Image: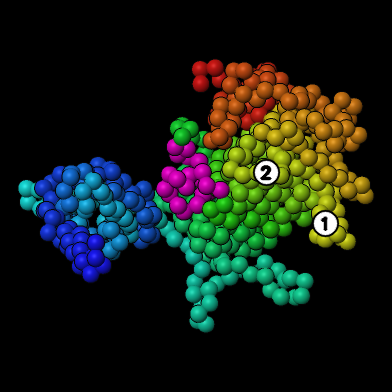
Amino acid sequence: MPRYLLIPILFLVVFWSSCRKDFEFQDSSGNLTFSRDTVYLDTVFTNIGSSTYTLKVYNRSNDDINVPSIRLGEGQSSSYRLNVDGMAGKEFENIPILAKDSIFIFIETTFDITPTNENSFLYTDAILFDMDANEQQVPLVTLVQDAIFLFPSELADGTRESLLLGLDTEGNEIRIDGFILDDDQLNFSNEKPYVIYGYAGVAEGKTLTIEAGARIHFHKDSGLLIGSGGNIAVNGALSTDEELLENEVIFEGDRLEPEFAEVAGQWGTIWMVPGSTGSMEYITIKNATVGLLVDGDENSVTANLTLKNSQIHNSASVNFWGRTAWLEAENVVIGSAGNIALYCNLGGNYSFTHSTIANYWRSSFRNGVALQIDNFVMPNENEIIARDLIQANFVNTIIDGNNSIELLLRSSEDRSFNYSFSNCLIQFRDTNEQFIDDPLFDFENNPAYNAVLLNGNTDFIDTRTNNFNIGQMSDAIGIGSPNAALLVPLDIRGFQRPSTPDIGAYQFIPEN
């Protein structure tokens, strides 16, 4: 074919194909289909934007169609926001969808619950497609919760409030975003959840009291800081529903969507500095970076903290980190963590009775163990700081996990290192014989170990969800010390312990 004929023919083909679709789009006839019948946007706090949710709209016909109208039922006054095929707004016209193709609609909301005078409000609207006889709709549903928001104030110079942590080696101040709780903010009730931005501090001589059933949510890099001379009293109570935990005090992140329910590292920590004190009962701490950080004073003669009937799990680093702390714990479950579940660091004084320490972390590789105890730190290669481990006593306690070795003891010889395990189940399989000559791990001849069962079957119900109830095949059944059980007669769920008690925080109940 001559070249002078080829160019006009190619031009006509391109022109025809480019113009063809301009003439073949037909109006939709109410036959759209959707990826969801209803879009449920998970619970959000008032005036806090939701996550982005997706709706896919399908044209399953053989024809290219035009949707004359896509809009929110409440129009421009709706508290929902849409993005339709890349365009943001609340009302759209003439949206094309090719044959056997689809488009995406992205949905968000921010809702102010104040005018409703409700603590929670079910906000609904709908996305409407086309109109009149061809109209189709997809309902939108969001539960909005009122909350008490606590955050640093903005100062006159444009900066935000901060808390002084100390000085670095060059004498410069170390600060974090935070604020001191006022006297009228020192009682957290269960009427509304609390959402904290930055670190909420408790000043010297003050007590933060938290009532049973309270819910405390932390934004990213936020937490509580109990200052020297400050006190925290968390007064949770036994719940009747093990899933709702209606009387438990729960500390967690401020992302309420189900996909964030087990995401570690969403917030900072609850930090008790040297000189602070506290008592906590029936609490759950989850999804922090360090769940509970307790700094003590080596000259202290009283407990920093008493912790009872509580659980800490799914921290990105450490669930409970005590540094020269003094802790008395009963019926405590310290679950999976990205590094160490329970870290008794730089000496201190620790007592655990009827507790379960189990690290089954699966989200990434883990270097740490379920339980580590030491009495020194090395800030650098040329410096060592050591303090006395007055005692670290574990009675009727499980130390377990998905690694071969879940107990690590490290001692500085020039300071005291007193520890004991009585009627405990310990996971310790030294297959590489790295501790074979270490007297700290001489389970047969070291008097620090009494009635210890190595590498028994715990038969936990579901380690993936930090459910450390024991099953009927558990070796923990009936091997506890009766004398210790008399001191803690009820398990973490309120069940009576018998004369031959199980070890750990949970008593096996056959009917449950």
Residue furthest right in the image: 414
Q: Is residue 212 above or below residue 175?
A: above
Q: Which residue was labeled with disc 1?
A: 378
Residue 34 visible within the image: yes
Q: Which mark is residue 135?
A: none
Q: Position of residue 143 (x, y in %)?
A: 32, 49
Q: Which mark is residue 366?
A: 2
Q: Residue at x 88, y 48 (%)?
A: 412
Q: Residue at x 25, y 42 (%)?
A: 37
Residue type pointed to by label 1: Met
Query: Which numbered disc, 2 or 1, marks the residue closer to the eye?
Result: 2
Front one among 284 and 359 = 359
Question: Is residue 257 shown left or right of residue 502?
Answer: left
Q: Which residues are magenta?
A: 244-264
Residue 94 visible within the image: no
For the residues labelled 2 and 1, say whether their Cβ atoms are less than 8 Å apart.
no
Q: Is residue 253 above or below residue 330?
A: below
Residue 201, located in which quarter of the rendered image? bottom right
Q: Is residue 366 magenta?
A: no
Q: Position of residue 128 (x, y in %)?
A: 17, 52
Front one among 202 and 466 = 466
- Quote the CA–CA distance across marks 2 and 1: 21 Å
Residue type pointed to by label 2: Arg
| Disc 2 crowd, CA 10 A, few/some/many (<14, 14-19, 20+) | some
Question: Is residue 324 shown left or right of residue 71?
Answer: right
Residue furthest bottom in the image: 157
